[in-house]
Image (tube, rainbow, N blue to C red):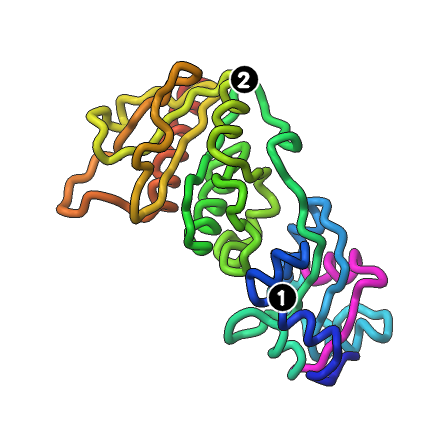
Amino acid sequence: MLTSLHNPTVKRLVKMRDNRARRKSGRILVDGWRETQQAIQAGLDPLGIYVAGDRGAAADAGQSASPQTASPQSGAERFVIDAAGGALVGVSTAVMQKIAYGQSERGVVAEFAAPRWGLAELRLPDSGLILVLDQIEKPGNIGAAFRCADAAGADAVILCPAAADRFNPNAIRNSLGAVFSVPSATADEADARSWLSARGYRLCAARVESSRPLWQADLTGPVAIVIGSEAYGLGDRWQSDPQSAVDAIRIPMAGTVDSLNASVSAAVFLYEAARQREATAG
């Protein structure tokens, strides 16, 4: 069991809480049993799974945690411990509090090599529904958008630019692990547009200045919905060009505000698309 806050492994994990250091290391940290389970189920191989307290003692003894110490996510906990193999490491409460993200530890911190999920790895149905997040900087919004994509049945999420960070701890937490369960890729705008057009996807961009309300838009068939940042929207990005047309669509706003949170906008678009697709199928 790791008990010293000065242990080199502990120091390395703490350093990885700095986003720049984490990205440079080529690794990601995942907090929480459910999120760790989803990462493993997505095919990520754990480099280290650090578990706290009685669970850590049980892990050192090669046993599962007892029912008395099991958390409400006991199913996920058992899955993680069974799948961890030699990557399982017990840590003291003090160490867990040191390496965990935020003010409250969640019983487990897992370390994985950052997956290289790009456009080439995406496998989509013929009439897929894709969410494109363009220049959304807040990790919490990225995570919430993934959560909405998962709930509405989107087939994939594409983040532009390629440097977008879907594995920020806030993104992972706000997504409830959906950054692992929903297929995704990062790409620059030009590459994403070219890739989508080559596969017959229509592009629908959320724009507050559009005269076309969402209720009049056709979101059936292969469609990619583009959501921009709250601060600047899409600006001059994602306009029609000779290679690909982009339909500008607005969400009707009845009040005095002129925009919604980016993840809320994504949810509205995705659920309208899901409604239309269900009606068409019916």
Q: Give residue 30's quadrant in the image.
A: bottom right
Residues shaded magenta: 76-93
Say whether marks 2 and 1 touch (CB < 8 Å): no
Q: Give residue 212's quadrant in the image.
A: top left
Q: Give residue 239's quadrant in the image.
A: top left
115 left or right, relative to 177 = right
Q: Which residue is mark 1?
A: 16
Q: Position of residue 264 (x, y in %)?
A: 35, 45
Q: Is residue 59 above or below residue 195?
A: below
155 left or right, relative to 137 = right
Q: Position of residue 255 (x, y in %)?
A: 14, 44
Residue 70 is labelled as none
Instruction: Tell me the crowding category of disc 2: few under 14, some 14 to 19, or many 20 or more residues within 10 angstroms, Cα based.
Output: few
Residue situated furthest left in the rendering? 256
Helix, strand or loop at disc 1?
loop
Please give the name of the residue rendered at 53% of the width and 50% of the height, measured from the top-left corner: 165
Q: Is residue 226 above or below residue 245?
A: below
Q: Which residue is mark 2?
A: 198
User: Which of the pair 186/274 is nearer the observer?
Assistant: 186
93 left or right, relative to 148 = right
Please give the name of the residue rendered at 48% of the width and 51% of the height, measured from the top-left corner: 143
User: Which of the pair 128/4 is nearer the observer?
Assistant: 4
